[in-house]
Amino acid sequence: HIIRDPASCVTGLMCGWLHHGFFKHRICPRILEIERYTRTDQPWTTEWWKFDLPPGWAEYTYRRLEEVCRFQWISANEHILRWVQRHRKDIQYIQVSERMLSYNPRLEMARLFDKLRLRSDESLVGALKCDRRTMVSYGVSDERRAEIRRIAIAITDCMRVRYIMEAYRDAGSSPSRIRVFTRPRIRTHAVGTTG
């Protein structure tokens, strides 16, 4: 399981929503009114939802884009945690840090191969060194990406996100430290969002 910083994930999701691709679910006859996404000069933004469509998605059809993306990240990660909890005795659960995988792929892959009791594969480590920009990177300018990153950092600084990251730390350390996971609700207020 590759674990990535929540703000980076939300940044990527927001950039994907603003990209000209990644259309996943056509929402008809419902109209999307997602601030920062829905635009009158791009009519498809009123009916195309991008990426995951988790339970409760309809409550987010009129929210800000950063709230939608945080909701998608939270929903996916809560699902992963529940799955790990249910199958913990039947699986060998190993976490890999995306940051370490990017910073020192050789060391992180050696650790992963060791945990899996596999012989290290140098060609795989060599392939990880390739520095390629993703398709999403071409759809958003560097200046806009920096603004999106600031928004993502602010929106992921909440209790619910911290709770998920703490649960991941617990899940990665030993089976006995996995917590029972509940699903708190996110409430929005006129002045901002709490979680």
Image (cartoon, rainbow, N blue to C red):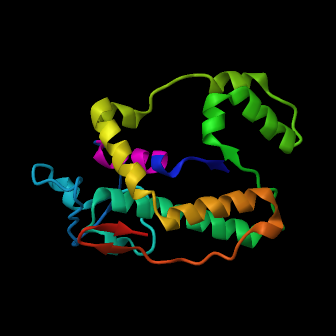
Name the residue at 87% across, 32% down: 119
Q: Residue furthest front?
A: 191
146 shown above or below 75:
above
Quarter the C terminus occupies: bottom left
Name the residue at 38% across, 33% down: 137
- Point out the stretch of residues depicted in magenta: 8-19
- Label count reads 0
Which image quarter: residue 89? Answer: bottom right
Which image quarter: residue 108? Answer: top right
Residue 9 is a magenta residue: yes
79 shown above or below 103:
below
Q: Nearer the viewer, residue 134 or 106?
A: 106
For this view, does 121 lie left or right of residue 194?
A: right
129 shown above or below 190:
above
For this view, does 76 lie left or right of residue 90?
A: left
Which image quarter: residue 181? Answer: bottom right
Q: Let me know if residue 50 appears in the view.
A: yes
For this view, does 143 lie left or right of residue 110?
A: left
Q: Nearer the viewer, residue 84 or 147?
A: 147
Taken as a whole, is the magenta stretch helix, strand or loop? helix
Name the residue at 20% across, 56% down: 38
Residue 51 is a magenta residue: no
Name the residue at 82% across, 69% down: 176
